[in-house]
Image: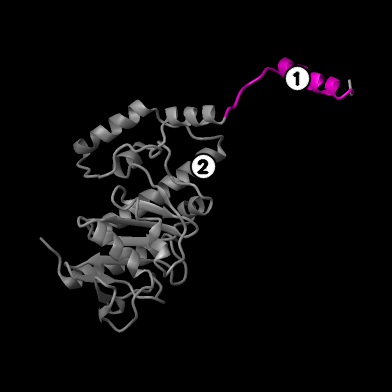
């Protein structure tokens, strides 16, 4: 049964408070929206803390981003939400935030794309990294375009993360999974590096999606997720090689002799 407008407003407010409580936004950061129908989107306004959000703060825009209802102004990043709705008719809600660890990966220029956790592989596939674009401009969404059709969570370089789904809680949960994945990946790196799953196991996890009732567009794409075999291939492509201690000493001595230093 579809929810009423008042219920959808309450859902956005509840998710806004959760996003704030989890520390995924600071000050007035972040934005949330729900698609009401073919022509209208309910969204958070600009210059409003998600931790202090009320149902009276929310506004309604058309699919061109023009405000239809509401006492506040629309978010400057509404174009990102509208692009996702246009490209993905199955999507009914979008959450954009700046979860610290996931955003740390985004600012380091690194996607969350290694095959580390079964839950992430089943639920999201991986989380690609979109190129940087100036917030509040069309450039913000340019780098996202290749990923929107295939993925439900995207890191935005030097900015944050955007997740979307069939309702606002699904979008929120995908953001939660993204940040949880980033935290675990970071700890693994601090402990000497993660153990990446082999391609055979990745394929099994993708095949198990129907058993878990997961409807996910993203299949196994080159580099997303990165399997153990991909990691080995990347190392080989970098022309890395190993030598013994004795071989290394011999190479150094030979170089010194060639320079007349030994």
**Residue 15 seen in the current view:** no
Q: Position of residue 66 (x, y in %)?
A: 28, 77
Q: Position of residue 226 (x, y in %)?
A: 41, 36
**Which residue occupies the foreground of this view, 117 or 228?**
228
Residue at screen point 42% across, 63% down? 139
- Mark closest to the chain's N terminus, 1 or 2: 2
**Which residue occupies the foreground of this view, 156 or 176?**
156
Q: What's drawn in magenta, residue-wise?
A: 239-260
Return the residue at label 2: 187
Q: Is residue 216 magenta?
A: no
Would residue 218 be found to the left or right of residue 108 on screen? left
- Which quarter of the figure has residue 244? top right
Q: Position of residue 6 (x, y in %)?
A: 19, 73
User: Which-is-in-front pick, marks 1 and 2?
Assistant: 1
Residue at screen point 20% across, 57% down? 89
Q: CA distance from mark 1 to mark 2?
A: 37 Å
Residue at screen point 50% across, 58% down? 158
Return the residue at label 1: 251
SS of the residue under disc 1:
helix
Q: Position of residue 257 (x, y in %)?
A: 85, 20
Q: Quadrant of the C terminus?
A: top right
């Amino acid at each position: 049964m579809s929810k009423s407008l008042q219920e959808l407003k309450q859902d956005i407010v509840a998710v806004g408070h959760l996003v704030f409580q989890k520390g995924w936004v600071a000050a007035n950061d972040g934005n949330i929206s729900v698609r009401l129908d073919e022509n209208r989107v309910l969204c958070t306004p600009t210059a409003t803390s998600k931790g202090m959000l009320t149902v009276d703060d929310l506004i309604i825009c058309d699919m061109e981003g023009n405000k239809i209802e509401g006492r506040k102004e629309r978010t400057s990043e509404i174009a990102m939400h509208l692009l996702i709705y246009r490209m993905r008719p199955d999507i009914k809600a979008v959450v954009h935030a700046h979860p610290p660890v996931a955003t740390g990966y985004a600012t380091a220029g690194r996607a969350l794309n290694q095959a580390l956790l079964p839950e992430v592989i089943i639920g999201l596939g991986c989380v690609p990294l979109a190129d940087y674009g100036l917030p509040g401009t069309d450039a913000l969404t340019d780098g996202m375009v290749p990923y929107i059709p295939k993925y439900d969570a995207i890191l935005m370089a030097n900015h944050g993360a955007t997740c979307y789904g069939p309702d606002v809680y699904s979008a929120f949960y995908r953001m939660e999974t993204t940040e949880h994945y980033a935290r675990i990946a970071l700890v693994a790196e601090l402990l000497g590096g993660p153990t990446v799953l082999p391609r055979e196991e990745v394929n099994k996890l993708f095949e198990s999606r129907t058993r878990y009732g997961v409807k996910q567009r993203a299949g196994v794409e080159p580099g997303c997720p990165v399997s153990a075999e991909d990691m080995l291939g990347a190392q080989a492509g970098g022309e890395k090689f190993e030598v013994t201690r004795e071989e290394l000493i011999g190479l150094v001595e030979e170089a010194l002799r060639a320079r007349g230093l030994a």
